[in-house]
Image (cartoon, grey):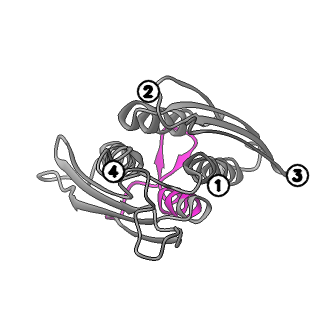
C-alpha cells in the first residue's frame, strides 16, 4: 500500500507544496527561502527515512513567521494524509538524541488528538539572518495540530561551561529527535497484522 501524500496550501501570505513518501530513503528537495529551516527539514527526511519535497514561497519581506508556520501546517497535513487510517503501524515512537553538549528527548503518539508539549532553554534570538528561535515551539505546535498527533519535545541538557546554550545545536537536536521518533511511530508493525493500534478501533 502506498503511503504517500501531496498537500498544497495557498493563502494570501504563502504558497506551499509538500510531497511525502513515508516509505522512502531519506531523499529531500527543500526550498522555503529560510536557509536554516531548510536544513532542519532535511533532518526530517534523512533521519525519518522519508522522501520529502517542500517548496514554499512566502512573504519573507515581512518576516519568516508565515513561511515557517504554513510550511509546518502543510507538512503535518501531509503526514496525516499519508498515514491514512493508521492500520498496522507502531503508533508510538521515541528517541533521545545527543548533539555535542545538547541532549534532546522526543516522544510521539499518532493518536489523532493534537497535543504538543515543548520545553527548551532561552536561546539567542536568531540562527543565521532569518530563523527566529522563538518559532521552533510554534513549528512543533503547527505540525502537531495538522498531523493530529501528540508530541513531547524536551531539551534535557544544553548548557556549555561558561557560556549560553548553542541555539544551532539545541534546535537541530530537536529536529533529529522528532524525526527518529516519527520514523519509529510510522513504521509498519509486522505483529499488528494490519490492525488499528487502538482498543477504540480508530485513530
**What is the CA distance from the residue labelled 4 to the residue labelled 2?**
15 Å
Q: Which mark is residue 181?
A: 4
What residue is disc 2 on?
26
* Position of residue 25 in the picture relative to residue 176 (left or right): right
- Choose mark 1 or mark 3, whichever is in front: 1
What residue is disc 3 on?
12
The one nearer the camera, 134 or 198, is 198
Residue at the spot 44% in from the left edge and 39% down from the top edge: 44
What residue is disc 1 on?
73
Which tag, 4 or 2, sits closer to the chain's start? 2
In percent of width and height, residue 106 lies at: 31, 58
Task: Rate crowding at label 2 as few (under 14), some (14 to 19) or many (20 or more) other CA atoms within 10 Å.
Answer: some
* 47 in relation to 95, above or below: above
**What is the CA distance from the residue labelled 2 to the residue labelled 1?**
20 Å
* Position of residue 140 in the picture relative to residue 179 (left or right): right
Badge 2 marks a residue whose secondary structure is loop
Badge 3 marks a residue whose secondary structure is loop
Amino acid at each position: 500500500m502506498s503511503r504517500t501524500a501531496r498537500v498544497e496550501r495557498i493563502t494570501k501570505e504563502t504558497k506551499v507544496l509538500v510531497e511525502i513518501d513515508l516509505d522512502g530513503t531519506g531523499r529531500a528537495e527543500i526550498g522555503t527561502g529560510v536557509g536554516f529551516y531548510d536544513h532542519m527539514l532535511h533532518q526530517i527526511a534523512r533521519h525519518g527515512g522519508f522522501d520529502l519535497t517542500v517548496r514554499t514561497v512566502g512573504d519573507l519581506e515581512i518576516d519568516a513567521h508565515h513561511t515557517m508556520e504554513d510550511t509546518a501546517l502543510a507538512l503535518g497535513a501531509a503526514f496525516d494524509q499519508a498515514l491514512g487510517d493508521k492500520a498496522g503501524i507502531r503508533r508510538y515512537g521515541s528517541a533521545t538524541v545527543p548533539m555535542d553538549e545538547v541532549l534532546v528527548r522526543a516522544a510521539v503518539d499518532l493518536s489523532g488528538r493534537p497535543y504538543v508539549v515543548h520545553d527548551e532553554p532561552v536561546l539567542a534570538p536568531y540562527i543565521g539572518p532569518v530563523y527566529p528561535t522563538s518559532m521552533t515551539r510554534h513549528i512543533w505546535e503547527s505540525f502537531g495540530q495538522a498531523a493530529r498527533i501528540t508530541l513531547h519535545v524536551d531539551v534535557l541538557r544544553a548548557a556549555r561551561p561558561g557560556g549560553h546554550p548553542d541555539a544551532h545545536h539545541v534546535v537541530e537536536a530537536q529536529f533529529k529527535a522528532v524525526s527518529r521518533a516519527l520514523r519509529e511511530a510510522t513504521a509498519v508493525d509486522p505483529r499488528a497484522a494490519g490492525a488499528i493500534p487502538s482498543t477504540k478501533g480508530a485513530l
